């Protein structure tokens, strides 16, 4: 019971830190229209940024040589509780006088129904996650073991993490998950790998709330916002598949951070394409939107190496959309992309510096294997990889979700909508991510059947949210077009 109370207080503290950060950034985004400020978005983004900020704080604290102690964990949790409570009190006091509009009773009932479904999904996901301790290879050997070492050593500069003979699979894997787990161990004063899994369903909740909040702020189609949020929340590959958000694997958190990044990049491109007369790059709101996207991207990189590939794909997709649609505003577009890139770079630079000091054991070394000879050998496996992915995405949809069928149907239903800058960005991002997976399978030192066949389902989790976002973007605005005509 004491452990449960400490986990609750620790979680509230993490959430509070994130709420304060999210409130500051989103208040800049909605500065011109405070009525559009959505408290749900603050709560969702607060969970996402709270876990990220906690991991980054611990990492910086550790690499400068300071020790991890239970006192540090309690102080951090206390600061978060005070900051979160203070932020919410101020925000609610500001919002209540403005929220005079009321929805029709029928819409209220529908929204409450959807909210009830989402709360039930969140509760069952949390229950499923906490029913078992860490039990899969990655969550124990790659992340869980490092968390125990960090907790017991109290430092990132000890011998264990720098010993090539230490029993861990990937010494150079990022540390966001181990640092969060170590934070909870410090609060409890012991290793309990059941309670430390609380972060995974909470990131799922944060992803869902952020998706809902951003769309509720961006559109008046609230019933459709609820439906598409439920669509995202019920993707089977995320929940209830045992390797999704109910496990201690990194694929769920990467899916969360990546989708949040894509959400705010999509929102930025949408505002730019719909407001050609202004230069949003000079507005604090647009800058903060890009900062949020950059922070989420950096957190994905700090969670798993796949985050690097996803960042490069995002960057290339942004560049392509810029060259196609914003050639007359290249200075503005270039400055925007630079802001996003610099945010990512500043967030992950300390990690890459620390990473150079870690030993290499069984890393795939993709970049060093990008040679003509290696690529030519992998071409033979190209057909198998494409067929495998198509089967997993479409033929096995009953197991992994209908999001890929929905994406194709949405393209066919509204082809002109699909080539708008913000929607085309999503298509390019999905295509680029799948291409990156295929290329990785071609140059990996392991057979493609083992490499892609054993990881494609987990990788597709990371981009499934982008597919749902594309579907929502296709269907969300259609009633407005009808009314306009």
Image (cartoon, helix red, strand yellow):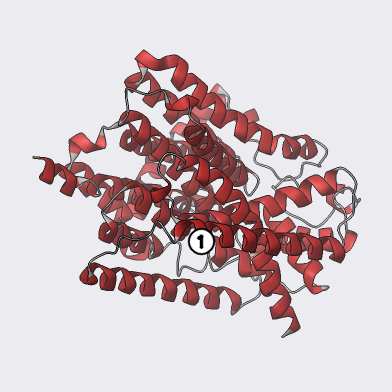
Residue drawn where x is 45% and y is 43% of the image:
30
Q: Is residue 65 left or right of residue 194?
A: right
Residue positioned 68% across, 38% down in the render: 348
Foreground: 54 or 140? Answer: 54
Residue 254 appears left or right of 384: right
Q: Nearer the viewer, residue 478 or 27?
A: 27
Give SS at disc 1.
helix
Question: Relative to 266, is 3 above or below?
Answer: below
Residue 382 vs residue 278, the one in the foreground? 278
Q: Residue furthest left?
A: 485
Please report the residue visible at 42 percent of the width from the left and 39 percent of the height from the top.
32
- Residue 138 visible somewhere in the drawing: no
> In the rendered view of the protein, which quadrant contains the C terminus?
top left
- Taking the spot 38% from the left edge, 19% from the top edge, the residue there is 323
Picture coordinates of residue 229, whole percent (x, y): 36, 60
Horizontally, residue 112 falls left or right of residue 480, namely right
> Image quadrant of residue 272?
top left
Residue that protrudes farthest toward the bottom in the picture: 1
- The percent position of residue 311, horizontal first and vertical second, equals 54, 36
The quadrant the N terminus occupies is bottom right
Q: Position of residue 413 (x, y in %)?
A: 16, 45
Compared with 403, 77 (above or below) is below
Disc 1: CA contacts within 10 A as few (<14), some (14-19) or many (>=20): few
Whether 427 is drawn above or below 65: the answer is: above
Q: Is residue 208 visible?
A: yes
- Position of residue 357 measured from the top left corner of the image (x, y, whole percent): 83, 38
Name the residue carrying label 1.
Answer: 92
User: How many numbered discs, if any?
Assistant: 1
Quarter of the figure with residue 120:
bottom left
């Amino acid at each position: 019971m004491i452990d449960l109370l400490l986990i609750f207080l620790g979680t509230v503290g993490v959430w509070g830190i994130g709420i304060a950060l999210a409130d500051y950034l989103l208040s800049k985004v909605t500065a011109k229209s405070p009525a559009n400020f959505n408290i749900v978005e603050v709560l969702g983004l607060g969970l996402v940024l709270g876990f990220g900020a906690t991991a980054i704080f611990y990492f910086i604290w550790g690499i400068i040589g300071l020790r991890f102690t239970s006192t540090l964990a309690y102080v951090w949790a206390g600061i978060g509780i005070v900051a979160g409570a203070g932020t919410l009190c101020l925000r609610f006091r500001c919002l209540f006088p403005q929220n005079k509009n009321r929805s029709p009773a029928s819409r209220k009932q529908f929204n409450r129904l959807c909210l009830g479904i989402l709360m039930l999904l969140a509760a069952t996901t949390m229950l499923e996650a906490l029913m078992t301790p860490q039990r899969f290879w990655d969550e124990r050997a790659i992340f869980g073991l490092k968390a125990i070492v960090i907790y017991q050593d109290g430092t990132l500069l000890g011998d264990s993490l720098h010993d090539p003979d230490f029993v861990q699979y990937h010494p150079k894997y990022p540390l966001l998950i181990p640092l969060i787990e170590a934070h909870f161990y410090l609060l409890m004063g012991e290793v309990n790998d059941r309670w430390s899994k609380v972060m995974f369903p909470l990131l799922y909740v944060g992803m869902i709330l952020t998706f809902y909040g951003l769309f509720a702020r961006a559109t008046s189609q609230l019933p459709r916002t609820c439906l598409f949020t439920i669509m995202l929340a019920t993707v089977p590959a995320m929940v209830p598949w045992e390797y999704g958000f109910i496990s201690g694997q990194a694929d769920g958190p990467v899916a969360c951070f990546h989708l949040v990044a894509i959400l705010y990049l999509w929102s930025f491109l949408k505002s730019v394409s719909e407001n050609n007369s202004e230069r949003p790059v000079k507005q604090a709101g647009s800058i903060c939107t890009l900062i949020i996207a950059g922070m989420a991207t950096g957190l994905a990189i700090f969670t798993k190496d796949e985050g690097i590939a996803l960042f490069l794909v995002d960057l290339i997709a942004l560049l392509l959309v810029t060259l196609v649609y914003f050639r007359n505003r290249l200075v503005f577009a270039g400055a925007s992309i630079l802001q996003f890139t610099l945010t990512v770079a500043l967030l992950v630079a300390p990690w890459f510096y620390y990473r150079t000091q870690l030993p290499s054991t069984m890393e795939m070394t993709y970049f060093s294997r990008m040679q003509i000879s290696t690529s030519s050998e992998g071409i033979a496996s190209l057909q198998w990889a494409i067929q495998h992915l198509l089967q997993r995405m479409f033929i096995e949809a009953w197991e992994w979700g209908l999001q890929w069928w929905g994406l194709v149907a949405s393209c066919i239903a509204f082809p002109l909508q699909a080539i708008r800058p913000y929607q085309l960005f999503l298509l390019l991002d999905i295509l680029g991510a799948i291409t990156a997976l295929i290329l990785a399978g071609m140059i990996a030192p392991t057979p493609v059947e083992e490499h892609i066949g054993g990881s494609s389902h987990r990788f597709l989790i990371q981009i499934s949210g982008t597919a749902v976002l594309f579907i929502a973007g296709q269907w969300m605005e259609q009633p407005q077009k009808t009314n306009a005509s």
